[in-house]
Image: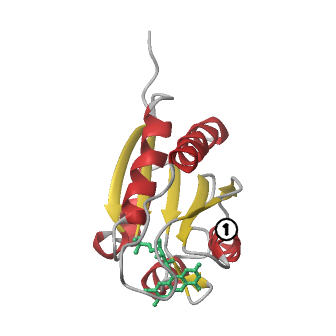
Amino acid sequence: MLGKRKKALVLYHTKTGHTADAADAVARGLESRRVKATVKRISEAKPEELAEYSIIAVGSPTRGAKPARVVKRFLKGLDRKALKGKAATSFSPYAGFRGKATVRRLSRLLRKRKAKVVRGVAVKAGAPLSLWKGPDIREKDILRLEELGRKLAKKA
Ligand SMILES: Cc1cc2nc3c(=O)[nH]c(=O)nc-3n(C[C@H](O)[C@H](O)[C@H](O)COP(=O)(O)O)c2cc1C
């Protein structure tokens, strides 16, 4: 008999849509490994919901070389052991600089709350210091995000 499907929550923040595209790609990777993935804006998520999921992915655009404030605030507001036993990762679209720093910062916040962290992915998209949408995430980077979802499924 088939086992019960694991559940993942993919949280993101976006202004011009790239991080939502990235979240969908991570979710597709998870789903391709039979994980049931729910994609949600972080501003609509509640800390209590996390208990239902064994896998968490968090995406934020790089803003001033860091994750967006709403994302940091959500993660910092979680209990110290809120992510214990869960597999987690992070991803960040960035226009040209410090995308990897954002991913590392997010990973550190996840690890502090006891998650088992899979190394995250930074992908280029958008325009620097601008609210113009700019170029979309390239197809090869969409594939990297899907692969991240598959790796995360394996870690859970
Ligand atoms: C206020 C602001 C600050 C930004 N800071 C950075 C930055 O430090 N490094 C960078 O590479 N891109 C930066 N960007 C560009 C965004 O990271 C990029 O456009 C990203 O793709 C936007 O994602 P979104 O469509 O999900 O909002 C910034 C954009 C804005 C609006």
Q: Residues within 10 Å of mark 1 (few under 14, many from 20)?
A: many
Q: Is residue 151 above or below residue 21?
A: above
Q: Is residue 65 visible?
A: yes
Q: How is the image coloured?
A: secondary structure
- Relative placement, left or right, of 143 versus 41 is right
**Quarter of the figure that contains the C terminus:** top right
Query: Which residue is at the front of the view, 73 or 77?
Result: 73
Query: Which residue is at the front of the view, 142 or 86?
Result: 142
Q: Position of residue 16 (x, y in %)?
A: 34, 73
The residue where tag 1 is placed is 107
Question: What residue is rendered at 63% in x and 52% in y?
Answer: 85
Question: What residue is rendered at 39% in x and 50% in y?
Answer: 24
Q: Position of residue 70 (x, y in %)?
A: 42, 84
The kind of residue on which mark 1 rests is Ser
Q: Position of residue 17 (x, y in %)?
A: 34, 66
Question: What residue is rendered at 69% in x and 70% in y?
Answer: 100
Question: What residue is rendered at 57% in x and 50% in y?
Answer: 141
Total labels: the figure holds 1
- Relative placement, left or right, of 149 versus 107 is left
- Relative placement, left or right, of 60 versus 148 is left
- Location of residue 149 (image quadrant): top right
Q: Position of residue 114 (x, y in %)?
A: 67, 64
- Relative placement, left or right, of 145 versus 103 is left
In the image, farthest residue toward the left: 44
- Location of residue 119 (image quadrant): bottom right
